[in-house]
Image: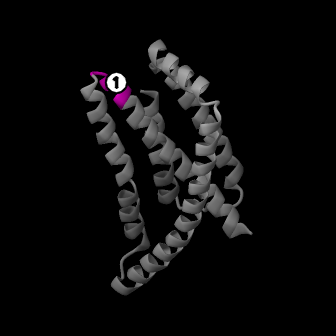
Amino acid sequence: MMDIVLVLITIIIPIFVLEQHIQIDIYAVPLFLILFIFFIFLNSRAHKIYLDTDNQEIENNQNKNSKNSKNRIKTFKYIMILLITGVLLFFIGELLGNSLEILCNFFNIPETIIGILLGIITSVPELITFFESQRYYKQIKDEMLGVVEATNNLLTSNILNLFIIQTIGILITSI
């Protein structure tokens, strides 16, 4: 339940900012970082309540097994892939932003409409993850864990987009 409330809050915040015509600038960065820490804290507390001891034992066993050198190499590999993907996403996002601006001007469509459509389109991966986790956990007869995983994925995506990605964008444009 706490996850769903947090997801709703992360949806309401941008709508409120948009409707109230609040200008977001460098002064919002500390607020976003504080909200990010607060949301992560609440999310971790909520998961301690929902996850039963069996799932915590599995997680503890995974943490014990993750200390070998093969996992360090895998971790380094994944970090490198993440960095390369981040750089590529930056350039692709820049091209996408320019393309959308041209489309808005060419078809005389408000940028807000294109932004909403882009937000819906970029939320498709979370929607797919939701359905796949439901299908997987339904097969093993643990639907509650599927709901927890799906809402946690959505919440994490919303928190990162709202507080971290936007904060980075504010910092870059302020420099």
Q: Position of residue 19 (x, y in %)?
A: 47, 58
Q: Position of residue 40 (x, y in %)?
A: 59, 35
Q: Is residue 140 above or below residue 14?
A: above
Q: Is residue 173 magenta?
A: no
Rendering quarter of residue 106: bottom left
What is the basis of the colouring in this image? one colour
- Extent of the magenta region: 141-146
Quadrant, the N terminus: top left
- What's the amino acid at mark 1? Met
Number of marks drawn: 1
Q: Is residue 7 above or below residue 22?
A: above
Tag 1's secondary structure? helix
Residue at 31% of width from left, 29% of height from top? 137
Horizontal arrangement in the rendering, residue 78 relative to residue 127 (left or right): right
Residue at 51% of width from left, 16% of height from top? 57
Rendering quarter of residue 85: bottom right
Q: Is residue 1 above or below residue 18?
A: above
Residue in front for this viewpoint, 133 or 98: 133
Residue at 36% of width from left, 82% of height from top? 108
Residue at 41% of width from left, 59% of height from top? 119
Horizontal arrangement in the rendering, residue 160 relative to residue 130 (left or right): right
Q: Residue furthest top?
A: 53
Q: Position of residue 58 (x, y in %)?
A: 49, 20
| Residues packed near mark 1 inside 10 Å, few (<14), some (14 to 19) or many (20 plus) | some
User: In this figure, which residue is indicated by the disc labeled 1?
Assistant: 144
Residue in front for this viewpoint, 33 or 146: 146
Q: Is residue 144 magenta?
A: yes
**Magenta stretch: dominant secondary structure:** helix
Quadrant, the C terminus: bottom right
Q: Residue furthest right?
A: 175
Q: Position of residue 35 (x, y in %)?
A: 62, 41
